[in-house]
Amino acid sequence: MGQTFDLTGIALVTTVALVCGLVLSRLRQPAIVGYIVAGVVLGPTGFGLVSDAGPVHTLAELGVLMLLFLVGMELSVRAFRAVYRVALLTVLLQVTLSLAVTLPAGELLGWPVERSILFGFLIALSGTAVAIKMLDDIGELRTDTGRVTVGVLIAQDLAFVPLLLLANAMGPSGGGLDAFILLKLLAAVAVLAGLVWFLSGRERVRVPHGEWFRRNLDVVPLAALAFCFSLASATGLIGLSTAFGAFIAGFILGNSNGRAIAIRATQPIQAVLVVVFFLSIGLLIDLGYIWANLGEVLLFLLVVTLIKTAINIGTLHLLGEPWERAFPAGVIMGSLGEFSFVLGAVGLSRGIVDPDGYQLAVTVIALSWLVSPLWLVTARRFHDVAASGIVTLRAALAEVYSGEIAAATRLGRALLHALQALRTRFRRRGTRNLPALPAPLRAGPAAAPVTPSRPIPPHSGSSPDHGRDGPHAAPAPKAEEFQ
């Protein structure tokens, strides 16, 4: 379509996204994976229906902003207050352990320290929208596991501001960590702490002109979006991310007395906003880059996903959460976060990463969401196993992965049998193909002539070669001896 993106193109994009979402939903997988796939298919490296990179990046930024506004409305600060100690300590350990992984890895790969730190920040954050969807799918959103998981996700989203300020200070154009940056960091933490304390009061925040909005529900969606864009603009003007302002707007509105009305009024456009976000993420995926760097991308995806999940599970259990809560919560938070895109864009603008490094970050983040159905299957199985009364981690893992363990055992036995058969075959072929020995060696050493001490009388009726039994064979018994 080139530079023109008319109504026909919009209709086609919407239809493809809807079809992909419905197919994944029928397969009991998150529809968001289908939206990402639709973006890949329609993007610049797919069929090229959306080929201009500028609108794609703008659409992605708008999608991040809208999604985080909706996520903020779904989060309860009172639920966070009940688990805030565990949540804050978990995030602190997640960031620390992520840096402990990326700094040595960056040293081995020859990365600058700033790039290693940025990737550590990217790994520490989890996908809030994906995690909440998974919790809802397995029925754990309102349980203890759901409360702990949502508490950690809120703490991560709040921790984004300090991480963003640190990322802005790094790189060639960052200016370094001076006293002004540290003061700004402390002020941001204080403002966030005050906001959480204010929203967790006994009474919910009152929305101005709430009665008028109740009588005019058709204006509520527009008013909610106006509030979102206003706070996004305000945070952007003071040097923070516009996406963070949108999240704060949703967070405030979701903990006010207008929460129910706002959620009900914006529900018709929520699906559209979610589609916009994940479709835009699919549009950013460069298939040519993935194919050219397939080994590196898959290695990073595997290492990041497994290490992040292990850090999540180990941290929660270390802080006193039992395995039946730590394991599903850690698995559900295994995908990378929405704010990771923002940090990646900041790293690119500050010169911390080059365009290839930014593309690697975007690709790994998006692919971590594409493989989220694997974590969803694991979470569902663990939910069923925990309901049956199994609480030890070893027994639960054995039950959750019983099919995979049995398949791996059968595969291992088949491979071992095949290797033994090949070994036997090569041994036989090696024996058969041995070089022929020379004639003297094949016949053995020549025997020395034997001179008899007395003449041997010839056997009567013997053949010249003395018969089958040789010259000294005993005479055959006579017939009467058998009678």
Image (spheres, rainbow, N blue to C red):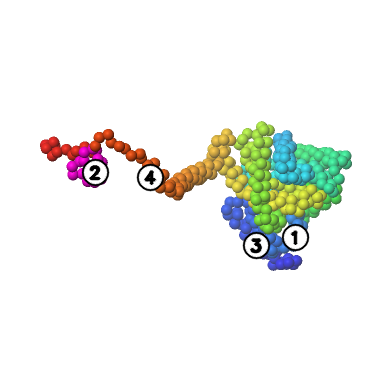
Give the percent coordinates (x, y) of residue 238. 85, 48
Chief secondary structure of the magenta portion: loop
Q: Is mark 2 on a helix, strand or loop?
A: loop
- Residue annotated with mark 1: 53
Residue type for callout 4: Ala
Residue at disc 3, secondary structure? helix
From the image, tell me which residue sits under label 4.
443
Q: Residue 471: within the magenta?
A: yes
Find residue 97 and report its image quarter. top right
Part of the protein shown in magenta: 456-472
Q: Distance between the residues labelled 1 and 3?
A: 21 Å
Does dot 4 land on a helix, a strand or a loop? Answer: helix
What is the quadrant of the N terminus in the image?
bottom right
Distance, label 4 to label 3, CA atoms, is: 85 Å
Q: Which of marks 2 and 3 is nearer the N terminus?
A: 3
Q: In the rendered view of the protein, which quadrant contains the C terminus?
A: top left
Q: Name the residue under label 2.
A: 466
Mark 1–mark 3 CB contact (< 8 Å): no
Q: Is label 4 in contact with label 3 (beta carbons under 8 Å)?
A: no
Give the Cα separation between the discs numbered 2 and 4. 22 Å
